[in-house]
Image (cartoon, rainbow, N blue to C red):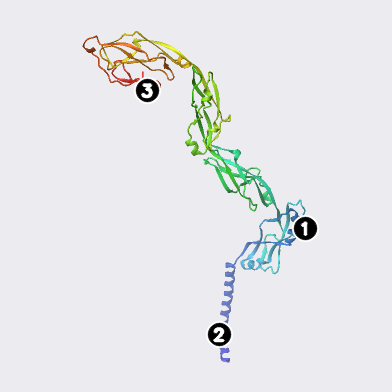
Amino acid sequence: MSKQLEEFRKSFVVNLPFKVAALLIALVFWFVILNTLDPVRNEGIPLTLQLRNEEVLMDNPINAVLQQAYTLRSTPITVQVRGTGRAIDAMRDSVIAYVDFAAADNIHAASQNLNFTATVRTQGNFGDGVDFLSVSIGSVPVSLDRVVARDIEVDFNPIGTLGAEFIALWDEMAISPSFLTIRGPSSEINLIDKLYVDVEMAYLQTHLDLGGVRPRAVDVTEATIIPQQAVIGTVDVFLPVFRRGYAHVLQPSYEGGVAPGFGVFAVNVSPSNFAVAGPATVIANMQSINLTPIESAAMQGATTDFVLEYNINDYLPQGVFLLSPGGGRITANVIVEPITERSFTIASENISVRGITQNFQILTQNITFSVSGLQSALADMTSPPIQANLGGLGEGNHQVGLNITLPQGVNIVGSAPTMLVQIGDGENGGGYEPYPYEPYVPYENGGGEPYYDENNENEVGEP
């Protein structure tokens, strides 16, 4: 045992000066390394605000009366210190910040915001090697906003305009609910002036029907506010949008006739076009409006003009409504005129002959006939065109019927006029060339006599 102790002593004292020097050098290196790896630095320590005696504030009778609470607002609390990282870490939990509500029992109904002071202090062992750089140990303002509620009307905010072919019924626009109760810190709620539902109008082609829309909050300058704590609910929005169009009204037909010796010259409808709107598909397929025919009872015995009234709303398709002013009133003015007669005398050289090119002679000098029709129609009537078809007639004298083209509603009085024609010279069969015969269809029945050029060779249509 003593031998082992002797060996240990010798190992300790042998080269003792060198060993002491090595230890000193190691300590110097350790100090240098320590200061290099953990240097002295400045650092901000954020503090969490503690609430003390909070029950005094919440138990205050004024809260029960107003049914309101409070929300905490404070600026960040940071303590600036200087020291090594190890020293700073050792003292972090020694610095606290708190606000004491012990004096909050003196608030009253007029209070909106409550201002308190937060205290920053050290507790326990603060730690060596740390210096405070900023004197934040003291007072920090803390504001407790009263939570308030306000009812604010929600407004529709159209962005842009509808296309010209569409119309919105603003009187039927609905926002539900029209008022929202917003709740939050008074400092936020008091900034909100209006609530808007923003809608891009240019893209609307049918009804706007939105649900669960959260309105946009703005202040008095119309600047948008993004609440941090205030709660804003949602609304449903409906705006009817229809396509524009026009309804064209046709004149009504009529049954029966007026008094003997009279006729209907015209039925004038006024107005004949109405601006309407409705679903896009209905407007696109809407036809002209046919009014109810005029009953024979209204026509019977009439000798003068009379007026009938209609309403366009009774004829519009379902879902289509009137845009034109006037309530949709339509007047049908039935013009009644006497039936009169007029005579015409036409020289034979003005009669157009077809079906033969030579060896014929018209023996009748003038053709006289009478027509009957409404007074206005006969007053404006000029001498009507007359044709005679001599095709297929043999040699000799013939009484040929004439085709007279008359305006619609004008008729020949009595029998249709004729003229005497001589074919050939009494010898060799006459030398004529018959042309194909086409039966004549009277003008008033939708037809007309084909008309040939002066050589009776090429058909050129109606005269």
Which numbered disc flags the more N-terminal residue, 2 or 1? 2
Q: Which residue ends up furthest to the left in the rendered image? A: 428
Residue 300 point in image, percent of width and height: 52, 22
Q: Are marks 3 and 2 in contact (CB under 8 Å)?
A: no
Tell me, yes or no, if residue 421 can be seen here: yes
| Residue beneath the point at 38% across and 20% down | 442
In the rendered image, residue 3, in percent from the top left (x then y), is placed at: 56, 91
Q: Amino acid at mark 1?
A: Asp
Q: Quadrant of the C terminus?
A: top left
- Specify the farthest residue to the right: 106
- Above or below — where is 180 with respect to 380? below
User: In the displayed structure, would residue 281 be above or below residue 268?
Assistant: below
Identify which amino acid the numbered label 3 is placed on. Answer: Gly
Mark 1 lies on residue = 105
Kindly state the secondary structure of the residue where label 1 is placed. helix
Residue at the (34%, 10%) spot, across then down: 348
User: In the depicted view, which residue is nearer to us: 423 or 248?
Assistant: 423
Q: In the drawing, does residue 82 fall left or right of residue 303?
A: right
Q: Image check: 59 left or right of 29? A: right
Residue 116, percent across and down?
73, 56
Taking the spot 75% from the left edge, 52% from the top edge, the residue there is: 111
Residue 299 or 309: which is nearer the viewer? Answer: 299
Which circle's residue, 3 or 1, is located before the other in the chain?
A: 1
Viewer-nearest of labels 2 and 1?
1
Residue where numbered disc 2 is placed:
11
- Disc 3 to disc 2, C-alpha distance: 147 Å
Circle 3 sits on which residue? 447
Of the pair 436 and 463, the residue shown nearer to us: 436
